[in-house]
Structure formats: C-alpha cells, structure tokens
C-alpha cells in the first residue's frame, strides 16, 4: 500500500505538470523521422488544434460509462481520446487523457476496419510512466481490451492484472513516446510506445469498435481513478 501511495503522489505531480521531465532518450528503433512506416495520415478531418481524427485513429466515442473516482479529462471529451496520442515518455504521465474510473468503460468507433495483418494490428495508448528512483517499476492502471465488428458482439483479449509485468493482453502498462512534439510516429510500434494487440491471438479477423474496461480494484483515487485513455491507433486499416 505504501508503494502504491508513493506512486500515486508521483502520478498526481505528473498530471499537475510538476513530475519528473521525460528522459529525452529515443525509444529503441530510432526517431519517427527515421522509421520506414509512413505517418502520412491522408485526407482525414482534424480537430481545432490540427490533430487528425478518423483515418487510423478513433473517430467517435460510442459510449462512456465512468466508474467511481473519475472526472479527469471528462470536460475534454470526445477530443481527448480521438486522433493520435500525446505521450510524454518514460518519466511523466501524459495529461491529454480521460480517466475511466474504477470499473469504468469506454467504446470507440473507427472510420476504418481494424484487420488482422502481420504482427500487431492496433495500439492502445495510456499514460503509464516509470516510477522515479525505481527504473524497473512502471506505474500502471490496467484495462481489459475487447473488439467488435458490429458494436454488439465482443471478443476480449485475455488479461490478468494480478500478475507481474509484462501484462500481455492488458492495456495500460507501457509508456507512450509518440506525440506531436516528439515526432515519434504513432503508427510505428518500434518508436510509438503503448500496448500492442494482435487480432489473430483471439481468433478475430476484423473489427470496427474497441472497448476498454478499467480493471482497477484498489478503490477510488479522485479525480483520476482507473485507466487513463489517450488514444488508439490502427496499424492495419481497411475501408
């Protein structure tokens, strides 16, 4: 519990802009400009601040059911979870997020289908960060990830939040490097950060909806309880 409280204090400093600065180290694989994968999002709509909406990113919030202890970022819906991520690296949790609350859930819709291709098919971005002074420890708030083709029938990725890292199948345990400032491409898993998901691992060929459900069980920590969603990027889109 003491470790959890200490991590919470660090996280509050981060969302208040007072946390440790990002390390500045490049993610393994080079910078976004060095990556072979294109970050040309094409002719898709943009938000008022110039960020793209749709294309390889979520275009709408289909539903949002917040759990207890969450209000952070809610005033910025839906924009905060549309378009590419705004990560801040290892040392600080990003603030362009929406907290789901304990047991809360959100469903995102896409203008393109997520299809099963080689390797991972989409990336979920949260705001996990390395706990200061504990280089191997990451502050995590995990979520179950489910996909659907019609928005009614769902298939979930197996996720055990109780075990040690890596939390394969869960979202919310990897820092995010991609942002408009860093230049790291959100569509290049080698540099983007975030958690990767492969449809083949759950026997699904395509999907148009992604649901995230918070798996927090330690009680409410207002105003930012639970999983904090930044963005979802489609790596293998098809219209």
Image: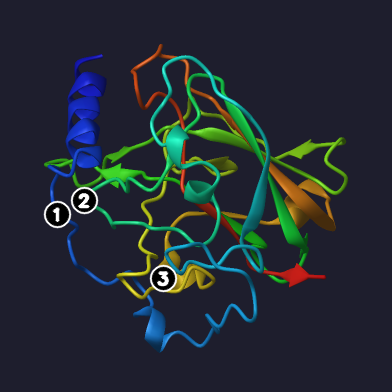
Task: Decide: is 139 above or below 126.
Answer: above
- Judging depth in this view, the residue of 25 and 109 nearest the camera is 109
- Residue at left 40%, top 23%? 225
Classify residue 32 by image quadrant: bottom left
For the residue labelled by badge 3, is the local secondary structure a helix, a strand or a loop? Answer: helix
Horizontal arrangement in the rendering, residue 231 relative to residue 135 (left or right) = right
- Rounded to the nearest angstrom, the CA distance separating label 2 from label 1 is 6 Å
Q: Which residue is mark 2?
A: 91
Other residues around mark 1 within 10 Å, as few (<14) / some (14–19) / many (≥20): some
Q: Position of residue 12 (x, y in %)?
A: 22, 31
For the residue labelled by badge 1, is the local secondary structure a helix, a strand or a loop? Answer: loop
Classify residue 118 by image quadrant: bottom right
Q: Which residue is mark 3?
A: 191
Q: Earlier in the sequence, mark 2 or mark 1?
A: 1
* Mark 3 or 1, closer to the camera: 1
Horizontal arrangement in the rendering, residue 216 relative to residue 123 (left or right) = left
Q: Position of residue 79 (x, y in %)?
A: 51, 50
Q: Which residue is mark 1?
A: 21
Classify residue 140 by image quadrant: top left
Task: Decide: is 217 above or below 207.
Answer: above
- Rounded to the nearest angstrom, the CA distance separating label 3 from label 2 is 16 Å
Q: Earlier in the sequence, mark 3 or mark 2?
A: 2
- Judging depth in this view, the residue of 35 and 17 nearest the camera is 17
Residue 191 makes an appearance in the image: yes
- Judging depth in this view, the residue of 198 and 105 nearest the camera is 105
Q: Earlier in the sequence, mark 3 or mark 1?
A: 1
Task: Decide: is 92 above or below 156.
Answer: below
- Judging depth in this view, the residue of 96 and 207 nearest the camera is 96
- Residue at left 41%, top 70%? 191
Q: Are marks 2 and 1 in contact (CB under 8 Å)?
A: yes
């Amino acid at each position: 519990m003491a470790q959890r409280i200490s991590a919470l204090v660090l996280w509050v400093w981060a969302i208040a802009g007072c946390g440790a600065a990002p390390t500045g180290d490049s993610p393994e694989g080079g910078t976004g400009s060095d990556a072979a994968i294109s970050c040309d999002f094409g002719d898709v709509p943009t938000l008022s601040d110039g960020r793209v909406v749709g294309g390889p990113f979520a275009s709408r919030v289909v539903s949002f059911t917040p759990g207890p202890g969450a209000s952070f970022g809610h005033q910025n819906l839906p924009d905060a979870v549309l378009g590419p991520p705004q990560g801040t690296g290892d040392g600080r949790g990003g603030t362009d997020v929406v907290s789901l609350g304990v047991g809360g859930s959100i469903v995102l819709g896409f203008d393109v289908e997520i299809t099963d291709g080689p390797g991972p098919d989409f990336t979920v971005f949260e705001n996990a960060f390395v706990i200061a002074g504990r280089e191997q420890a990451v502050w995590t708030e995990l979520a179950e990830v489910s996909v659907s083709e019609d928005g009614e029938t769902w298939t979930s990725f197996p996720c055990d939040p109780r075990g040690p890292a890596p939390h394969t199948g869960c979202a919310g345990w990897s820092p995010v490097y991609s942002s408009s400032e860093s230049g790291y491409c959100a569509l290049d898993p080698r540099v983007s950060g975030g958690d990767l998901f492969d449809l083949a691992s759950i026997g699904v060929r395509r999907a148009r909806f992604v649901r995230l459900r918070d798996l927090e069980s330690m009680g409410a920590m207002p105003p930012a309880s639970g999983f904090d969603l930044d963005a979802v990027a489609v790596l293998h889109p098809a219209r």
